[in-house]
Amino acid sequence: MTAPTFFDAWHYDGKSAIKRKVEVQTIGQQFFLLETERRHGPFMFADVEYIAQKGDVDVYGLNGEDGWRLMLSGPVPTELAAMLPARRRYGGWVDRLGLGKATVAFTLASAAAVAVVLFSPQWLAPLIPSSVDKKLGDALVGDFGGRFCSTPAGDAALKKMVASLDQNPQDLQVEVAKIDMINAVALPGGKVILFDGLVKQARSPDEVAGVLAHEIGHIREKHVMQALLRQMGLAVVLGGVDGNSGALVNNMLAMSYSRGSEAEADAHSMKVLGNAAISPVATASFFERLSELDGSARSGDKGQGIAGYMSSHPLSRERKKAFEKSIVKGKNYKPALTSAEWTELRTMCTQDRKAKSGFGFDFN
Amino acid sequence: MSEDLGQRHSAFRFHGTWQEFAGIAFPNLLLTIVTLGIYRFWATTREREYFWGKTDFIDERLEWTGRGIELFIGFIMVFFLIGLPFIIIQLISQGLIFRGETIIAGLVTLLMLLLLFYLTGVAYFRALRYRLSRTYWRGIRGGSDDPGFQYGISYMWKSFAGWLPIFLMVPWSMISLWNERWNAMSFGPHRFVATAEWKPLMKRYLLFYLVPFLIFVGAVVFGIAVAASGNSPDALGGTGMAIGGILLIFAVLAMYIILPLAALAFYSKYFRLAVGGLRLHNLEFEFRARAPDWILFFLANMAIIICTLGIGYIFMPYRSWKFFIDHMEAYGEINIDELTQSETIVSKHGEGLLDAFDVGAI
């Protein structure tokens, strides 16, 4: 069975750095390495692993023998070549499939992973028990550092407004915070925070009702939990991408989704305003004033350019138009609050001296 | 059987060509993109296999035996052991801020940053250890039995000590940490001995340190001289303004050109001293690149990246390795019979920590 071979074979035994000129003697599934006065082996072909190609030399190692090397060059006999492991270029899967096919397969797998992360939150979010949602909201907000305003009459006015806008007001927690910013946020656990700046600048209770209905829309459509899940998923999937480009893709995807959510919340707002017989006119004029702030009124009909596409909120001007369209002519609208109630709500934060004001931190 | 290195031109030689490397770099880029970055661990491994395999030390090529999966596992470990807990801690501290507990939130964040700093030190150490344990020459590898946790502590206190006297002791901390790192490493049966000195580095460091002040003082002196040589401020008028503007431009340019040059001059001296202080048994090492070599190297890198509209970036590992090997030199002799296998432990995971913090090794 032994057949002498006529090609170059060198060997390191992994124990010392001495380079040995050897001949490979094959016996079935085993082989010996023959020096002039020494015989190394037997070794199993099954233990041989491909290490590297150095110039025209193929280097093999032996599983379990640190530093053991067999280096072959020249015309290796086909019987021996058949016993040795294949060359490795890119790594396991790519070598098996070939570069072209592997590229296609990886592209499809990546697209599928991104798609799952983008679409699954829509049906995953409702599966998260509301107790978890509640705990998360409590952990995040707590008492908001004592910034919530409260007076008996103001609380009653707010409660009346919430009740007119939602059929299950008991699982919502709406608060006014003593922060001088025109903003409102929906948070996990059915929490809505209206900033005092928004309430103070409003020209009528209908305006506050429109914004509040929009935030309640976010909660009823489960947008908060969806956005949270989507962000977590994208962070995992794009975690492998180099920092900056990953963050850019992540932000753009998140942004396009939040634009969709804003439109849904607006639709919810218009619907419940209609049900409560509160006029959407005030909310439309609120967006009119906002559009003067964000500049979309000035940019003419080309307003839905880059700014409209990239910003998370639909352009204020478009929202104004949408709210104006939802006005039903001849409908008997009534104000969201009586003027006494409205005064109590607007002055709640001024009256409540115990509430702390401002942030002490950067909100954005 | 021993090799006398004194007879040879250079103990280290690199045989690679950029054309060959392109055949590795472009498929790597493609696969990295379509796998959303996950392939990059295998990409790095392929690049290293090429660099090591094309590098001669005396009469035999080096061999890189690291695996992409090791780097990947390292990355995953860091993600779950460090990344995830840190995201949670950040959420908690945000919650604390919401509740107005700003001081506690600040403390939590400070602790987190300190821990990250410690782990950066550990990461430097473990990356060097990983690379040595995967580098083979004549079937023999390097490594270390030290896990590097102690080094992380040294990294923290020596860095702080370097910064404390208005950053004047940075050269000491850099050299001292280099020595500590390399003294823990070995190749085959031999320990590395690192005895680099920091004092010869101070002159270059002061040059770099004082550049901003020198530029400022120079600008002020020149401005006064111009003002004094001119007539009254009224007579100068527009020209005075123009000269002031030109001065300002010069000062800004000086900051952007002279400061990096001074930094390179410092780094070149640092690396020369650090490598020059390194011994392995009867081998001594030298790094021959001087400041002008480094400057040319960086200018060429910038030119390549700009002229190729950024694609040249994928050739930077090639350029760095070539620069490194072309300027490496070793003297002394190696007794091949004495060079036996390293008995250090081999960890199964790669440079996850280092990868996460995005810092260079060696």
Image (spheres, rainbow, N blue to C red):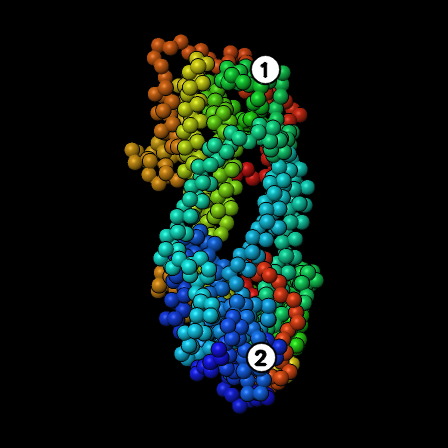
Mark toward the start of the polypeptide (2 vs 1): 2
Q: Circle 2 is placed at which residue position?
A: A40
**Identity of the residue drawn at 64% across and 27% down:** A355
Real-space Cα distance between discs 2 and 1? 93 Å
Q: Where on the picture, by quarter, is residue B106?
A: top right
Q: Chain of mark 1?
A: A
Q: Nearer the viewer, residue A289 or B236?
A: A289
Q: Position of residue A356 (x, y in %)?
A: 64, 29
A136 left or right, relative to B235: right
Task: Give the class, few, some or many, for how many residues have Cα within 10 Å of label 1's Cα (few <14, many ≥20).
Answer: some
Which residue carries the number 1 mark? A156
Query: In what quadrant of the picture does the N terminus of chain B appear?
Result: bottom right
Residue A80 seen in this snapshot: yes
Residue B104 drawn at (x, y percent)? 68, 41
Q: Is residue B175 above or below residue A262?
A: below
Left or right for B88, reference B229: right
